[in-house]
Amino acid sequence: MSLLNLLKESQLDILRNGIDKKDSELIKLLKSRIDIAIEIAKFKKENGITVVQPNRWDEVLDNLKKYCSRVGLDYDLVIPVWDAIHKLSIKTQQQITH
């Protein structure tokens, strides 16, 4: 392998390590979000509130659209990720409230 190819590979490894670090941060944030969802579920259970609150989901989506616009992300590409996170939150809350 040439020196140029080694340098390119090294640079790619550095960039990939940056992605790996961000993935780790995302997982930690997701765990933190789940912990909050657990507290919300406990509150809902104690107060007879249903897990799914459609108005709140609409609010989350409105905020998401604003956040995406501010940072230059395509909302249509981000929404499937948020939908998966929302489903995880619902599942987590249902495990506690039932």
Image (spheres, helix red, strand yellow):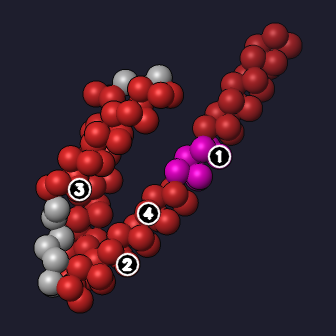
Residue 75, image x and y in percent?
33, 29
The Cα–Cα distance between marks 3 and 4, rounded to whole angstroms, is 16 Å
Q: Which residue is mark 1?
A: 21
The image quadrant that residue 40 belongs to is bottom left
User: Callout 3 environment at 10 Å: few (<14), some (14 to 19), or many (20+)?
Assistant: few
Which residue is tagged 4? 33
Badge 4: residue crowd in 10 Å (few <14, some 14–19, many ≥20) = few
Q: Which residue in the protein does label 3 denote? A: 56
Q: Which mark is residue 39?
A: 2
Whole-angstrom CA distance, mark 1 to mark 2, is 28 Å
State the SS at label 4. Answer: helix
Residue 45 lies, in percent from the top left, at 21, 85
Secondary element type, mark 3 = helix
Q: Secondary structure at mark 1?
A: helix
Taken as a whole, is the magenta stretch helix, strand or loop?
A: helix
Q: Nearer the viewer, residue 76 or 48?
A: 48
Comparing 53 with 26, the one in front is 53
Crowd tier of the residue under label 2, counting other residues whose Cα lies within 10 Å: few below 14, some 14–19, many 20 or above: few
Q: Amino acid at mark 3?
A: Arg
Left or right position of 53 against 3: left
**16 horizontally vs 33: left or right:** right
